[in-house]
Image (spheres, coloured by chain):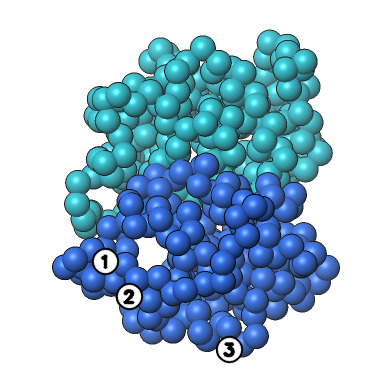
Chain colours: A cyan, B blue
C-alpha cells in the first residue's frame, strides 16, 4: 500500500452512493506535505516527458497542481468552470455534458495561455466519469499543444472515465485506484499497482 | 519598488473601469516561482504570529495559499462560494452582499476544519471592497478561532476594503497597494510601503 492509499484508509470516509469523502486532506482542507509527496511521485512517473506547463481545473485541482508544479518548475494554468456563455475575449471553450448528472458545463481557458509549443501535464484530484477531464483534453488539443500526461490523485476504477482515457492512448497515472467501496463497513479496495520505488520518494 | 510591483508593471494590463488584469501570472496562469517569493515575504511579515492554519477562498486564492503554506508548514482550508442554500452537513455559512455588484453570495467552510484552537492566516489574491474577506473573517470568528493576520497579494487602495479591515484592528499586509490606475496610459501608481529587507528574500 502506498502513502496515499494509507492516508485514504486512515482519513477517508465512505458514504452511500459510492461517495469517498477525502475533504480532511485533499479537497477542502489540504495537507500540503502530502501534496508534496504527490508532486514527487508524479515527477517520478512522468520523468521522461518534457513537461513545460501544468493544466488543471478549478477549484480542488488548483492546490495540488501548484505544489506538483514545483517539482517540474513550470507554471500552472487553471481552467474555469462556467454555466454561462458570456465569455469575454479570446477563450478556448469546451462544452461537457455529464452522463450521470445530466447537466452541461463549460470548461474555459484563455487562448493566451496555451499554444502549440506547450507540452502539458493535466493534473486533477479525482477521476470518475471523466467529464471535466474530457473538456480539458479537448481544450489542450484545440490549442495545438500536446497532452504529455495526465496525473490523477484518486481514480474511481469502477467508473468508466479512466478506462476510456487509457483506451484513447493517453498516459494516465492515478496514484490510488479505488476498485470498490462499502459504505456499511467503510472498506476501500484498491487496485494493485506496480511497486513504487520508495528510494526515490 | 518590490518584486511584485515590478511584475505588475511588466505584465499587468490596466483596463477601463479600474480593472487590473494579472491573469498571466496570478489568477489564471500562475507563476509558481513568484508565489514562492510571495510566501517568503508573508512569512517574514507574519513571523511573530503563531499561525497553524491558512484559510482562503476559491478559486484564485487556492494556489497562492498552498505555496504560502509551505513557508508556514501548515494546512490550508479553502472556503467555497455558493449561491445556493442547499448545505449538506455541518457548515459555517457567511452571507456576503456586494455593495457594488448588488448580489448575495455565501461563503462556506465545514465546521470540522475550524476550531477555537486555530490561529488563522487568511490569504487571498485581491482585496477591493473586501466582500469575500468579510465573509472569511466572519466564519473564522464564528468558529472561535482567531484571525492572526490577513495577507493580500494586490490591494486596490482606492477602494474601501483595506481601510475598513485595518480600522477593525486586523493585521492586514498587502504586498502591493494600487492607489491609482490609468487605462489610457497603462500607468499604475503604488502606495509607498516600508523598505523590504531584501536580505531575507
Task: Report if the CB atoms under discs 3 and 1 are less than 8 Å apart.
Answer: no
- Disc 3 is placed on an element classified as helix
**Residue A176 tag number:** none
Label 1 residue SS: strand
Residue A100 appears in the rendering: no
Q: Nearer the viewer, residue B104 or A199?
A: A199
Quadrant of the image containing the N terminus of chain B: bottom left
Which tag is nearer the camera, tag 3 or tag 1? 1
Answer yes or no: is residue A47 visible. Answer: yes
Residue at 40%, 70% in the rendered image: B190
Tell me where residue B2 appears, x and y as whole percent. 48, 59
Pointer 1 with pointer 2, Cβ within 8 A: yes
For image coordinates 58% across by 46% down, the residue present is B36
Q: Chain of mark 1?
A: B
Q: Which residue lies under the disc numbered 1?
A: B187
For disc 2, the neighbor class at 10 Å (few under 14, some 14 to 19, many from 20) is some
Q: Nearer the viewer, residue B159 or B91?
A: B159
Residue B146 pos. (x, y %): 74, 74
Left or right: A191, with B161 as reference point: right
Q: CA distance from mark 1 to mark 2?
A: 8 Å
Q: Chain of mark 3?
A: B
Circle 2 is placed at which residue position?
Answer: B180
Residue at mark 2: chain: B
Instruction: Give coordinates of residue A75: x percent, y percent.
Output: 45, 37
In depth, the one of B21 and A127 nearer the eye is B21
Q: If you read the primary sequence from the N terminus, does the residue marked by circle 1 or circle 2 appear first?
A: 2
Mark 3 = which residue? Answer: B167
Tell me which corner region of the image, top left, top right, bottom left or bottom right, holds residue A179.
top right
Amino acid at each position: 500500500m502506498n502513502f496515499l492509499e494509507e492516508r485514504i484508509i486512515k482519513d477517508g470516509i465512505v458514504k452511500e452512493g459510492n461517495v469517498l469523502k477525502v475533504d480532511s486532506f485533499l479537497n477542502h482542507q489540504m495537507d500540503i506535505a502530502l501534496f508534496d509527496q504527490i508532486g514527487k511521485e508524479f515527477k517520478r512517473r512522468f520523468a521522461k516527458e518534457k513537461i513545460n506547463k501544468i493544466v488543471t481545473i478549478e477549484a480542488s485541482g488548483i492546490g495540488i497542481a501548484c505544489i506538483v508544479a514545483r517539482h517540474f518548475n513550470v507554471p500552472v494554468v487553471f481552467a474555469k468552470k462556467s454555466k454561462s456563455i458570456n465569455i469575454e475575449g479570446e477563450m478556448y471553450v469546451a462544452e461537457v455534458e455529464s452522463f450521470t448528472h445530466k447537466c452541461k458545463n463549460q470548461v474555459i481557458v484563455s487562448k493566451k495561455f496555451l499554444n502549440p509549443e506547450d507540452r502539458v501535464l493535466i493534473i486533477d484530484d479525482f477521476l470518475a466519469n471523466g467529464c471535466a477531464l474530457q473538456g480539458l483534453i479537448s481544450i489542450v488539443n484545440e490549442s495545438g499543444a500536446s497532452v504529455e500526461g495526465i496525473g490523477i490523485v484518486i481514480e474511481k476504477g469502477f467508473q468508466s472515465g479512466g478506462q476510456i482515457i487509457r483506451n484513447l492512448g493517453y498516459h494516465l497515472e492515478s496514484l490510488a485506484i479505488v476498485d470498490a467501496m462499502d459504505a456499511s463497513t467503510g472498506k476501500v479496495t484498491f487496485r494493485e499497482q506496480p511497486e513504487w520505488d520508495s528510494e526515490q520518494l
